Amino acid sequence: MIEIQGLTKRYGGAAVVDDLSFAVGPGRVTGFLGPNGAGKSTTLRILVGLVQATSGSATIDGVPYAGLPDPLRRVGALLEATPVQRGRTAYRQLLALAQTHGLGRGRVEEVLDLVGLTSAAGRQASEYSLGMRQRLGIAAALLGEPSTLILDEPTNGLDPAGVHWLRNLLRAQAAEGRTVLVSSHLISEMALTADQLVVVGRGRLLADLPMAALTSGHASLEAAYLRLTGDAVEFSGGSR
Ligand SMILES: Nc1ncnc2c1ncn2[C@@H]1O[C@H](COP(=O)(O)OP(=O)(O)OP(=O)(O)O)[C@@H](O)[C@H]1O
């Protein structure tokens, strides 16, 4: 269970996350949507202790991330621009992470297989393509079989088969009772993947609804989303 309560983050004078509250329950996939700059990544980075909130709280199973015992087994996170360690193979990277948490080679091989990187595991991760790096990041998130998954734009760089695979993976993880929070700009993909949607705009909560309730009365999730976020879009392109 993820709980965000009165969360605010200010950079300079500006609140990029602004008194945000929502909860993410287990057993379903929760999509985290919002326009560019709405504060999604900042919220997720606060959740995993990479950014300090100005005020409010963000907890996982009732505890801030920094206070979780054995965090790899409790939370698997994929964040944007996760650095890749140069000069190390993907296998070595995962093994090092596994060993610091008492996990063996067997689990490393399992997650490599799960994300389709077995044949590339001996290559330097710094030479990986964007989609391969995403797969490696997802492998690292899954390593400890955590009860909570927090994924920021996991479809970035994935090919269509990868997007399809990830959808099934997330749904299976939720069906096993895990808490799954996933941000995405691919609204049509979210329509197929998510059960619940949290929508933010300019750092504030715009909706926290089951998929059917959010789309009710609209032709599609995209139509519902565009309507909901219309006033919260900061960056929009011109007509040509
Ligand atoms: N370290 C930082 N210093 C100053 N401003 C920041 C910093 N990190 C993020 N911001 C600002 O916070 C706002 C929210 O950014 P954030 O990355 O959380 O949005 P987002 O919803 O994830 O956007 P996108 O969909 O484009 O990835 C943006 O205006 C961004 O410029």
Image (cartoon, rainbow, N blue to C red):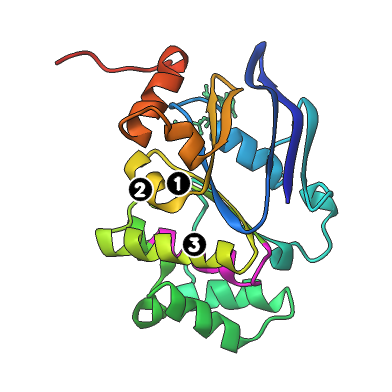
Name the one closer to the observer, 90 or 26.
26
Q: Earlier in the sequence, mark 1 or mark 2?
A: 1
Q: Label 2 belongs to which residue?
A: 189
Q: How many residues crowd around disc 3 within 10 Å: few (fewer than 14), some, or many (20 or more)?
A: some
> In the image, residue 78 lies at what x, y percent?
54, 54
- Of helix, strand and loop, which mostly describes the magenta segment? helix
Outermost bottom residue = 106
Q: Label 3 belongs to which residue?
A: 171
Gap between marks 2 and 3, in whole Å? 12 Å
Question: Does 143 lie within the magenta span?
Answer: yes
Start and end of the magenta stretch?
133-147
Gap between marks 3 and 1, in whole Å? 16 Å
Name the one closer to the observer, 54 or 239.
239
Q: Amino acid at mark 1?
A: Glu
Residue at x-position 60% and y-position 72%: 143
Q: Amino acid at mark 2?
A: Glu
> In the image, residue 100 lies at what x, y percent?
72, 74
> In the image, residue 87 lies at what x, y percent?
47, 68
Q: Earlier in the sequence, mark 2 or mark 3?
A: 3
- Which quadrant would the C terminus be assigned to in this image? top left
Q: Amino acid at mark 3?
A: Arg
> In the image, residue 201 lies at what x, y percent?
52, 22
